[in-house]
Amino acid sequence: EAAADYGEEVDYTITGIDGGAGVVQSTEDAIEDYELDEWNVQTSSDAAMIQELDNAYQNEEPIFLTGWTPHWKFQEYDLEILDDPELSYGEAESIHTIAREGLEEDDSDAFQIIDSFEWEESDMEEVMLEIQDDVDEAEAAQNWIDENDDMVSEWTDGVDENAGEGETISLSLVAWDTEIASTNVLAQVLESVGYDVEMNQVEANYVFASVADGDADASTAVWLPHTHADYHEDYQDEYEDLGPNLEEGAQLGLTVPAYMDIESIEDLQE
Ligand code: PBE
């Protein structure tokens, strides 16, 4: 089957997530960059996209996804990220933590933990997979913490076990599986030293706006340099960029099941 036939089979539709996601914006850019005039992105949510993937996969039908790594879908399904010679999806990304201005002065212990939080792709995948296997989010985070004592005790080094004294720390996130995993781990660590943690699931724009306004204390959900470049440019003067919590392994791309006979976004040009 010719790659170009896939267009008709999927109604020239790419199955996307929420409209605020960088990967949806990048997909719209790809449609322009590769002149795929007939194509469009259908927005929904991470969970809904996965449901559509599962349906297509069971029947070996073609499907195009707004994909990214790390994500457990690459463990559960045999998927490929298509080549992107125009770099519509950018290159390698890092995931950064941001904190509101003044957090360091107001609460140096919470700040230390939030600033120190950093892990690797395989760690994030482990937590995501467990959540996907129906383990409660907080429990999956705690299981990872229990197995990674050494790493976690570096983040809390010198912090008293009751440091939080019941103070509330609020973390903003979008309901993307990657960010559900990282936010829950950070929340469990903060709670282990006496903080109350509020996790607020919001729209992408508000992750940035809430930390910029000081409505939230921090977020672990900032993908740079490409994915969230626009949001970051708008708000970066109003929050602190604490650098990567995941340095390597993050990448966006147009994603398909490996049973499809296609390698590059260019193959969609008719
Ligand atoms: N994601 C997950 C987000 C960043 C984290 C890749 C879906 C996005 O595209 O904005």
Image (cartoon, rainbow, N blue to C red):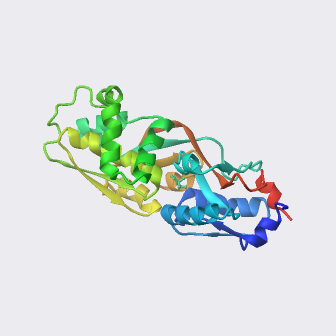
Q: Is residue 160 visible?
A: yes
State the residue at coordinates (77%, 66%).
6
Query: Left of 173 or right of it: where is 249?
Result: right
x and y, in percent, of residue 17 in the image:
54, 64
Q: Is residue 5 above or below residue 215?
A: below
| 147 and 216: which is toward the camera | 147
Q: In the figure, residue 111 lies in which quadrant?
A: top left
x and y, in percent, of residue 158 in the image:
22, 26
Location of the N terminus (image quadrant)? bottom right
Query: Left of 5 or right of it: where is 214?
Result: left
Q: Is residue 102 visible?
A: no
Query: Left of 251 or right of it: where is 124?
Result: left
State the residue at coordinates (62%, 41%).
92
x and y, in percent, of residue 124 in the image:
45, 41
Query: Left of 172 or right of it: where is 35?
Result: right
Q: Is residue 83 above or below residue 105?
A: below
Q: Is residue 140 above or below residue 174?
A: above
x and y, in percent, of residue 115 in the image:
36, 36
Location of the C terminus (image quadrant)? bottom right
How many dots with numbers?
A: 0
State the residue at coordinates (16%, 33%).
161
Q: In the figure, residue 4 lies in which quadrant?
A: bottom right
